[in-house]
Structure formats: C-alpha cells, structure tokens
C-alpha cells in the first residue's frame, strides 16, 4: 500500500470538461510534486510545491493549474485539455524540497482525453 | 547536459538467475541515487536509495551500488522470481531540486 494516495485512479474527459486530480499524504512531508508520464517514457516533472507554495513550474501549459490547499493535499485542476495530454499523472512527496530527499510516489491517475 | 541512461532497455532472464541492471549518469555532483520499480499502469515503488557518501545499499535480494567517480550505479537482483518482472528506473538529482530519471529497463523473468 502506498503512503501517497491519488484519486481518481482513472479519468476520461472531453476537451471541454473541467476536472481535478487529487493527491494526499499524511507523512508530514512539506514538498509535493506532480509528474506526467507517457507510455514507455520516464516521468517528467511538472510542478513542485514547498511549504504550500509553488516552487517550480516546468513551463507547463496553463490548462494545468496546481493548487496546494494545505500541507497534506495537492490538487491538479484540468481545463480544455488536448488529446496529447492523455498520460499517467503521478504525485510524489518528500520531507522537504531539495537536499536529495527521497521521493515517495502514489499509484497515479490514468487520464484519457477524448 | 545532465542525463541518466539505462542500458539495456529490455532484459529477459530465466527464473532463478542473478542479474544486474545498469544506470549511468553524466555528472558526479549528485545528492543520491534512487532505484524504483514500476509495474504496468502503476506508480513508482522506491526500492533503494544510496546517498552520495555511500557505496551500496541492500534490501533483501536487492543490492544497489554507487560509483560516483565513474558515473555508474548497478542494481543486483539475486535469485530472480517471476514477480520481479517490472520496469526498473534509476533517478538522481544533479545537485539541484529536480529528480532526473533514466529511461528504464523492462525486466521479464521467464518461469
């Protein structure tokens, strides 16, 4: 069982829909991450939150909007996505950002854009 | 450019054999190196983490080594089992905030 919980596990949405991905951890970690992973490729970093503040945005299109309402929760709001955005979206957390802290991953949300 | 490479991309071995997975990185200024396992359609499970000051870490049948000077890490799996079949990813941070992943080795253990 993973200590980072992501919901939903699967999501199918149209290009005009608005949906949100959720991530939760109760390990007291103060850094949380969103990654995007396409089939047979390694994960690619999208966003990093440190102490509930956005620390890194890897030039992600504005149709992806992250939010960190508290130290345990991380959301990714989706709007007007494109078919190429279909992927596995992974959330991770670490005790703090940087310094080589190990990251713990959730099982991901499999997103399909119709 | 800071890169992490894993060769081969795919590996098949009979059950019971010992095997080694390779990971190489272009810059020795790393904090640590982490090995992950990923089953199809699933997230990443952390297997071992080696700090930059360490040479190896062991967990059960797994042993990971780190040689910063040569930019290499290996993951040794002893007495392989069909349940070991998965994609194995190594990842490191080149002294910065980001985790850089290798492209992975897809391992198949043949019963």
Image (cartoon, rainbow, N blue to C red):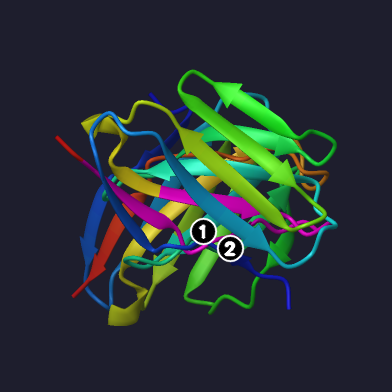
Q: Which residues are magenta?
A: B88-109
Classed neighbour count for the residue bearing mark 1: other residues with Cα under 10 Å, few (<14), some (14–19), many (≥20)? some
For residue A108, say whether it is visible.
Answer: yes
| Element class at badge 1 | strand
Q: Are marks 1 and 2 in contact (CB under 8 Å)?
A: yes
Q: Residue B71 falls in which quadrant of the image? A: bottom right
- Position of residue B32 measured from the top left corner of the image (x, y, whole percent): 74, 44
- Which quadrant of the rendered structure holds the N terminus of chain A? top left
- Position of residue B7 measured from the top left corner of the image (x, y, whole percent): 47, 63
- Where B23 sits versus A16, above or below? above
User: Image point 33% across, 80% down: which residue?
Assistant: A84
Q: Earlier in the sequence, mark 1 or mark 2?
A: 1
Label drawn at residue A35: 1
User: Image point 40% across, 52% down: which residue?
Assistant: A21
Q: Is residue B96 magenta?
A: yes
User: Which residue is labeled 2 in the image?
Assistant: A45
């Amino acid at each position: 069982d993973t200590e980072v919980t992501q919901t939903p596990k699967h999501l199918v949405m149209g290009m005009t829909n608005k949906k949100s991905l959720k991530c939760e951890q109760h390990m007291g970690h103060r850094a949380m991450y969103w990654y995007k992973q396409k089939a047979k490729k390694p994960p690619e970093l999208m966003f990093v939150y440190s102490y509930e503040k956005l620390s890194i945005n890897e030039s992600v299109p504005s149709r992806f909007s992250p939010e960190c309402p508290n130290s345990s929760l991380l959301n990714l709001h989706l709007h007007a996505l494109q078919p190429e955005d279909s992927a596995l979206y992974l959330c991770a957390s670490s005790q703090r950002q940087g310094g080589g802290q190990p990251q713990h991953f959730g099982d991901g949300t499999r997103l399909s854009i119709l | 450019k800071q890169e992490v490479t894993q060769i081969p991309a795919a590996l098949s071995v009979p059950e019971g054999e010992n095997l080694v997975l390779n990971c190489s990185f272009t810059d020795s200024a790393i904090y640590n190196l982490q090995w992950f396992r990923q089953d199809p359609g699933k997230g990443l499970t952390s297997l071992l983490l080696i700090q930059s000051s360490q040479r190896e870490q062991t967990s059960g049948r797994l042993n990971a080594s780190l040689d910063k000077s040569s930019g290499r890490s290996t993951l040794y799996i002893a007495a392989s089992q069909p349940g070991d079949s998965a994609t194995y990813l190594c990842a490191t941070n080149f002294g910065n905030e980001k985790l850089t992943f290798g492209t992975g080795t897809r391992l198949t253990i043949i019963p």
